[in-house]
């Protein structure tokens, strides 16, 4: 095997095995940063040895064994150091007595618990949201620093530094390598799901750059969401989030037009929706509902997405049900953005005036002041009412607010259409 | 990217004999591993070709040919559909699968990449689509 091929194989093995490797090691050394270094050491050993020895039959087990030896070396080293310093951390004390066999036994335990610990530690509240995002993609998703940097369009050293700082923060705050249990788990779960959905949204509605979609990032988030749902199958919201992402991802192909422009949900060619992902999404939603979680925020959003997924054509959409789901969502987690979406649904179910009433009630909201979808929705409703001059102003404002080039082009196009319709005045007013 | 890992038929599978319990358990464990890694999209087994047919095409003529079909080694008996970052990753996942024909079986699992939307956004396909759209607008 050529050296280049071995390198690629090692990259692939790392992606598959690294999370479990790091999680297992972190339980022993009680420090995610140290665990990752040990796992990296094993990786370096593979890079040195495999080009000559060939790739072992079970490369994952090889890495694990090598990392175990590194862990034992680590204990010997820290024991000497600690001895010199004369201070022994209490939780490290028991670890020092570990023999190689103990380490073996610990690592061979069910790895699922360790993965869950890794997820919760990487989403720990002592970390900034940016740090959680980077750490999750790196530790749980198995992405390289370079891949994360590319996905978020930031320089590689920025991400590298963010990860180093995050690991230091965890160590300094002495965050234990533990996952919460029972009600505390349910309480801390939203913070985990939020990080995953943030990653998904960065790929789904790219906030910067030339492309409207970064599917790779969505796939990474989807993978994290599926991992978490499998780790805690009893938590309905984990399935709710997985359902939401599966259904949203099912529209990727239809969401971009032939010249790279975004296509709105109702204008999409539904034959291009991925039926397999819809099926997976609906199945995950059913799981959430069966667990009694039909009214969690993610399950509600998934249920709304499912209404679209089930409608064979845009005019067959059950808008009244969507309005009811948004009503529930705005009671559960009221936010201007949810209200804005509710306005769209109201407009579809009961006519543009009904939608506009909600939008206009939001006009003082500070959080929406720089949100391009606010004027965009208002423009849409106004144009449906034949108020093209006002609609044009809203679309132009929306265009000035978005950072995405594709989106801006399209909003300007709509503003221009309004300008034409406004002068010709040929389109009659529609009323609710 | 998505990959299909295709399992080939054996004389037993073509006879409709289900795999022994141990292999079933190993396959189940493997499926769980793929699901836990968040990469399993779909998986299924196919009934023997004696339950299937082939539609033979010859120009505009179509003839239905009943199974079973010969050359069981090349027939498809099942598949996994996974999401991976590269062919290398898919290869490593496929290598973790239990031998589909049992511990001493001699067979292969074929790993094939699916077409993705990105494959059509650049190059000839898109140009051609655009041309067709322009034409239809003019007509």
Image: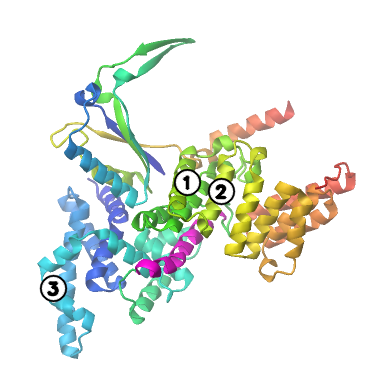
| Left-right relation of A153 to A49 | right
Mark 1 burial class by Cα count in 10 Å: few <14, some 14-19, many 20+: many
* Mark in the foreground, 1 or 3: 1
Q: What secondary structure is marked by label 1?
A: helix
Q: Picture quarter containing residue A93? A: bottom left
> What separation in Å lies between label 1 and label 2 (alpha carbons)?
9 Å
Q: Looking at the figure, which quarter contains the N terminus of chain A?
A: top left
Q: Position of residue B135 (x, y in %)?
A: 68, 28
- Badge 2 and badge 3 both on one subunit: yes
| Left-right relation of A297 to B55 | right
Rendered image: mark on residue B43: none
**Which residue is labeled 2 in the image?**
A305
- Placement of B90 over or under B135, stated as above or below: below
Q: Chain of mark 1?
A: A
- Placement of A365 over or under B85, stated as above or below: below
* Mark in the foreground, 2 or 3: 2
| Left-right relation of A243 to A271 | left
What is the magenta range? A180-205
Rendered image: mark on residue A281: 1
Q: What secondary structure is marked by label 2?
A: helix
């Amino acid at each position: 095997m050529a050296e280049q091929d071995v390198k690629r194989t090692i990259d692939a093995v790392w992606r598959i095995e690294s999370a479990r490797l790091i999680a297992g090691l972190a339980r022993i050394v009680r420090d995610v940063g140290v665990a990752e270094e040990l796992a990296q050491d094993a990786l370096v050993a593979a890079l040195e040895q495999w080009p000559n020895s060939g790739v072992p039959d079970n490369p994952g087990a090889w890495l694990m064994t090598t990392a175990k030896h590194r862990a034992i070396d680590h204990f010997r080293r820290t024991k000497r150091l600690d001895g010199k310093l004369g201070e022994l951390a209490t939780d490290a004390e028991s670890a020092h007595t570990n023999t190689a066999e103990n380490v073996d036994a610990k690592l061979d335990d069910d790895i699922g618990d360790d993965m869950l610990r890794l997820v919760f530690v990487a989403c720990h509240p002592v970390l900034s949201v940016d740090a959680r995002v980077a750490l999750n993609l790196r530790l749980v998703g198995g992405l390289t620093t370079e891949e994360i940097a590319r996905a978020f369009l930031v320089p590689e050293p920025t991400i590298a530094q963010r990860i180093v700082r995050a690991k230091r923060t965890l160590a300094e705050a002495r965050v234990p390598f533990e996952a919460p249990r029972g009600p505390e788990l349910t309480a801390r779960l939203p913070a985990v799901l939020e990080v995953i959905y943030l990653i998904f949204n960065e790929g789904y509605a790219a906030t910067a750059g030339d492309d409207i979609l970064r599917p790779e990032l969505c796939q990474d988030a989807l993978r994290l969401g599926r991992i978490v749902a499998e780790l805690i199958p009893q938590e309905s919201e984990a399935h709710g989030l997985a359902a939401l992402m599966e259904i949203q991802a099912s529209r990727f192909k239809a969401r971009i037009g032939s010249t790279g422009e975004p296509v709105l949900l109702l204008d999409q060619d539904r034959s291009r929706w991925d039926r397999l992902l819809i099926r997976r999404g609906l199945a995950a939603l059913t799981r959430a509902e069966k667990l009694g979680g039909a009214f969690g925020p993610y399950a509600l959003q998934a249920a709304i997405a499912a209404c679209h997924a089930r409608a064979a054509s845009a005019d067959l959409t059950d808008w009244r049900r969507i309005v009811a789901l948004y009503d529930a969502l705005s009671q559960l987690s009221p936010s201007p953005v949810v209200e804005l979406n509710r306005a769209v649904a109201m407009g579809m179910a009961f006519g543009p005036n009904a939608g506009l009433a909600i939008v206009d009630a939001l006009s003082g909201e500070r959080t929406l002041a720089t949100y391009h979808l606010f004027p965009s929705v208002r423009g849409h409703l106004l144009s449906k009412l034949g108020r093209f001059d006002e609609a044009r102003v809203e679309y132009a404002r929306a265009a000035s607010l978005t950072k995405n080039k594709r989106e801006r082009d399209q909003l300007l196009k709509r503003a221009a259409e309004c300008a034409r319709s406004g002068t010709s005045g040929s389109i009659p007013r529609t009323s609710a | 990217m998505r990959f299909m890992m295709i399992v080939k038929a054996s004389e037993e599978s073509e006879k409709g004999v289900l795999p022994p319990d141990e292999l079933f358990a190993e396959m189940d464990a493997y499926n769980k591993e793929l699901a836990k890694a968040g990469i399993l999209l779909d998986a299924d087994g196919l009934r023997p070709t004696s339950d299937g047919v082939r539609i033979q095409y010859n120009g505009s003529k179509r003839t239905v040919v009943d199974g079973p079909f010969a050359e069981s080694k090349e027939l498809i008996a099942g598949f996994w559909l996974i999401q991976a970052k590269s062919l290398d990753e898919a290869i490593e996942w496929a290598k973790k699968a239990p031998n589909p024909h049992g511990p001493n079986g001699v067979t292969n699992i074929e790993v094939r990449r699916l077409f993705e939307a990105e494959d059509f956004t650049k190059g000839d396909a898109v140009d051609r689509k655009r041309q067709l759209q322009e034409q239809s607008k003019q007509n």
